[in-house]
Image (cartoon, grey):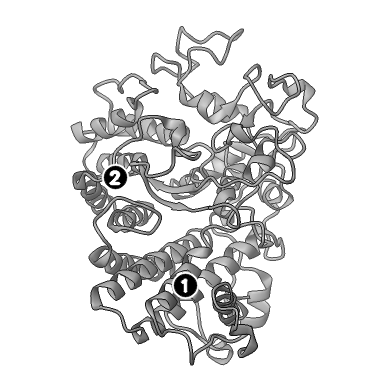
Amino acid sequence: MYTRNILQLGCLIALLITGCKSSFLDKYPLDQPAEDNFWKSEDDLQLALTGCYASLSVNQSQSVTEGFGAFTMYWDGISDNAYPRSTSFNNIALGQLEPTTGGIVNDWYNLNYRAIASCNYFLANADRVPVDAATLQQYKAEVHFLRAYFYFQLANIYGGVIITLQPEGLDYARDLQKSPQAEVMEQVLNDLDTAIAHLPDAPYSGRAVKASAQGLKARVLLYNDRFREAAATAKAVIDGGLFHLADEYYSLFVKPGQNNNPEIIFSARYLLPNMFSTLDYQMGWDQWERIQPIKNLVDAFECTDGKPITESPLYDTAHPYENRDPRLRKTVYVPGDPWKYSPDGIFDPAKDGNNRTGFLVKKYLDTSRAPTNYSTRSDQDFVLLRYADILLMYAEAQNETSGPDQGVYDAVNAVRARQGINMPPLPAGLSQTEMRQRIRRERRVEFALEGTRYFDLLRWRIAKETLTAIINPGGEPRKFTDRNYLWPFPQSEVDVYGIEQNPGY
């Protein structure tokens, strides 16, 4: 619950400290921050900052994984991109979205507020540390960015939520009321502006930089239909010149290609041996295969002539995966692909007892670890913001502002022309409506299985028509009603703290 998560922050900080100071347990209880010996040095500041970043990279030592960190692609399982072999997400796909649903409905609320509590605790105490002003400003700017990120995640799912900007106790929390979604977004933008003013204008190397905050700000503005501002903010990243498209698409999703990759602007980071995930065996091992791409996604990839499969003379129903956008085979395993997870080295859905869709995830799988088992530890970072998104956000916002001008074409065509992809440029003379549809298709294939598609469907207000057209394996139709554009608050928050439930639940 919200207030319990705030109080758990003391335990989080204490546990982080004990990893570095063995004598801490001798003097201090685990449920309280060590106020009299912490916040004394820059090392303490860095340790607390690590606590703020920790919620991005949920790992196997925590009970919550689905939908977070390395498992962000679970969100594609409730979009028209994939089928989730997860009770929590599949229930939502089938319309079982209620205050008592549990799983991700509770986890999304609780973990994001827990992360916000860490940020609030840091910002309330950081000034006590004797470091130079510039260093302190940068650390605080990173935490303003992180707090904005977590509030943005809450507002996208629940709409209006409680805003709290300082560590709160139980009694105070009972009196808090949720703010309208617009006010939450303004708080997000305020934090981002603070971050932009003080973060280093430098390439990304694991901690938030100026472009991280600018990119997230562009996303916030775009999601709220503030198109002119979104275009200008994305253009600032483009004009900054510090980031560009990676030379090889698949290198974005596995190490060592992720290291110092010029396209990655922000990510959930993992590092062996302790900060690891089980991504490879949960997505690739035929005992699991937790997220499975569906034909609807595969069919969205164009042929190499830039035409959809319904129009291209290159499409051959006998060889449906030939002459296709190269991103298809870098994102999805299709039947007949080399597949190290199979005894005979070939992916054959008919021989795979757990495969329900005929396709498997390839993006983010490190095949050097195959065949995998329960001991496999994965350390791929999960990319949360990259330069291709900056380009396509700029194209979308600029198209909505002034139509398909040359800047819109240039941004979309740059993504399509990436080295190793080399898709043809968009045809000239598209209308604003036609360009809108091309940008939406481009977003779908470029970011497939990266956890963004569901949120795109929500913000475009096409989730109902799109998702109810999807049939799950076994013949179960997907369900989505108008109320589902916002999720219900967990029933515990309504019962204990009296938070006003969202309409329709």
Counting from the top left corner in percent of width and height, residue 154 is at 50, 64
Disc 1 marks a residue whose amino acid type is Leu
Q: Residues within 10 Å of mark 1 (few under 14, many from 20)?
A: some
Q: Is residue 293 above or below residue 212?
A: above
The numbered mark at residue 47 is: 1
* Marks 2/1: CA–CA distance: 39 Å
Q: Which residue is mark 2?
A: 397
- Looking at the image, residue 242 sits to the left or right of residue 460; the answer is left
Q: Is residue 50 above or below residue 329?
A: below
Q: Is residue 60 above or below residue 28?
A: above
Ranked by sequence position, the earlier of labels 2 and 1 is: 1
Counting from the top left corner in percent of width and height, residue 239 is at 19, 45
Screen quadrant of the C terminus: bottom right
- Looking at the image, residue 94 sits to the left or right of residue 199; the answer is right
Query: Which corner quadrant of the image does residue 369 belong to?
Result: top right
- Towards the viewer: 312 or 118: 118
Dot in front, 2 or 1: 1
- Looking at the image, residue 504 sits to the left or right of residue 130; the answer is right
- Towards the viewer: 248 or 446: 248
Q: Residues within 10 Å of mark 2 (few under 14, many from 20)?
A: many
Q: Is residue 160 visible?
A: no
Counting from the top left corner in percent of width and height, residue 141 is at 32, 69
At 29% across and 28% down in the image, what residue appears? 413
